[in-house]
Amino acid sequence: MHVCEARLRADLFPDVDVYPFNLDVFTKTESLEFTRPVTFFTGENGTGKSTLLKAICQRCGIHIWEGAHRVRLENNPWEKTLWKAVQVTWERGRVSGAFFGSQIFQNFAFLVEEWETTSPGVLEYYGGKSLVTQSHGQSLMSFFSAVTKRPGLYFLDEPETALSPKTQLVLLDLLAEANEKGESQFIIASHSPILMSCPDSVIYSFDQAPIGPIAYKDTDHFKVYADFMEGMK
């Protein structure tokens, strides 16, 4: 492991009446342990899994490429400050890595295109092809193929977005291979029962407080898909 624990310091929460500090999963969870190279955060929308994923990423010093900023009617000054109340324990010291977010990937792809114009060879990291000229799903897989083969710490926020079930199986194979090698660590927020079936991975459920480990077949996402397929027989 690169990161073996993330602690939530409720005593450092600036205001327990505002999001995200008012979520039970944060006020009632003291720490999460990371014991396997691949860990999943799962739960319903709004449970805080992506928020905590980004907070741990920020605390680890890994930059999150943001999309274009827009004027908002209402602004929550604490919305992106959870990382200040997170402490991480490194097993052998800080390592480099990357963050993937389904909502901001397109902006990242254009940034890579710009970097290539001033630093030729950058695209070789992603298979040698422009991420912009490929289809959305193809560009995602170029990114995933690159990061799963290089040692480091990677945070993936809903990587199944824009991937067909067949392509998710390809990503699953990449994650399973990375899990077996143990050189890289992946912390992934996901709704995908396909990806969460990664052998020897750990799944944390955000549908309970405190956050705790859950068996694959006990996740709501697996049950919903299994019930749906059973009903189609």
Image (cartoon, helix red, strand yellow):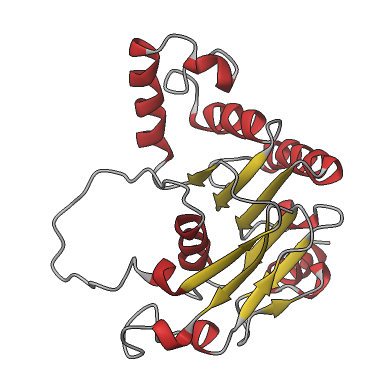
Residue 83 left/right relative to 72: right
Above or below, comparing residue 229 to residue 151 in the picture: below
Q: Quadrant of the N terminus?
A: bottom right
Q: Residue at x 45, y 56 (%)?
A: 58
Question: Visible in this render: residue 43?
Answer: no
Residue 71 left/right relative to 173: left
Residue 161 rendering spot, x and y as whole percentages: 54, 47
Q: Residue at x 53, y 70 (%)?
A: 87
Residue 206 rendering spot, x and y as whole percentages: 60, 76
- Please tell me in which quadrant of the rendered image residue 215 appears: bottom right
Question: Visible in this render: residue 218?
Answer: yes
Above or below, comparing residue 181 to residue 88 in the picture: above
**What is the total number of numbered labels drawn onto the structure image?**
0
Residue 81 left/right relative to 1: left
Residue 73 rendering spot, x and y as whole percentages: 13, 67
Residue 116 rendering spot, x and y as whole percentages: 40, 14
Observer-nearest of 231 and 153 = 153
Q: Residue at x 43, y 67 (%)?
A: 83
Above or below, comparing residue 141 to residue 185 in the picture: above
Observer-nearest of 104 and 150 = 150
Q: Quadrant of the C terminus?
A: bottom right
- Please tell me in which quadrant of the rendered image residue 175 appears: top right
Observer-nearest of 73 and 180 = 180
